[in-house]
Amino acid sequence: MKLALAAAAFIAAVSFAQAAHADGDVEAGKVVFRKCAICHSIDPAKKGIGPLMLGIVGRPSASVAGFSYSEGMKAANKTWDAATLDTYLANPKALVPGTKMVFPGLPKQEDRDNVIAYLSTLK
């Protein structure tokens, strides 16, 4: 019984975290993403300083073929779901010590929600 309650609580928490980002504004996220586009491309034909963002949502960390990831990112073993992206975008170095990403993060929750909503459209 305790296991069933714990599982239900976990599912509810994950659902809430996912729903919080579903409220992001895609168009506003596209504007905020301009900060990211300095290093990250959404076009597979264009290489950036950072890895390709096309298809990032749901992708395992350090998985873009041909990109030279830091040892920290290789060891991170994350899946870029909405909750993980939110944590990473708030403070990249806190979630993945040793990341090569120099951007300090997006302090505003609204900006993170909007970028995640935008990234979710990039398939």
Image: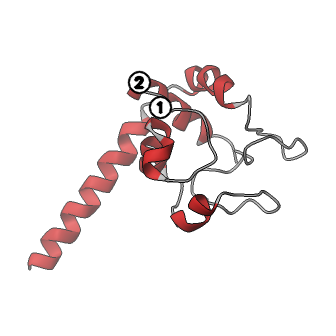
The crowd level at tag 2 (other Cα within 10 Å; few <14, some 14-19, many 20+) is few
Residue at left offset 42%, top offset 24%: 110
Q: Which residue is mark 2?
A: 108
Which residue is painted at 72% across and 30% down in the image?
A: 37
Residue 55, position as x, y percentages in the image? 68, 51
Q: Amino acid at mark 2?
A: Lys
At 78% across and 57% down in the image, what residue appears? 67
Nearer to me, 79 or 26: 79
Task: Name the one closer to the observer, 70 or 88.
Answer: 70
- Which of the 4 image quarters holds residue 5? bottom left
Q: Residues within 10 Å of mark 1 (few under 14, many from 20)?
A: many
What kind of residue is marked 1?
Arg
Q: Is residue 26 above or below residue 51?
A: above
Which SS class for mark 2? loop
**Residue closer to the observer: 62 or 32:** 62
Where residue 102 appears, as percent x and y from the top left, is: 61, 37
The x and y percentages for residue 86 are: 44, 41
Q: Are marks 2 and 1 in contact (CB under 8 Å)?
A: yes
Q: Which residue is mark 1?
A: 112
From where the camera sits, is residue 60 visible? no
Residue 43 lies left or right of residue 79; in this view the side is right
Gap between marks 2 and 1, in whole Å?
7 Å
Q: Position of residue 79 (x, y in %)?
A: 52, 60
Q: Residue at x 77, y 38 (%)?
A: 41
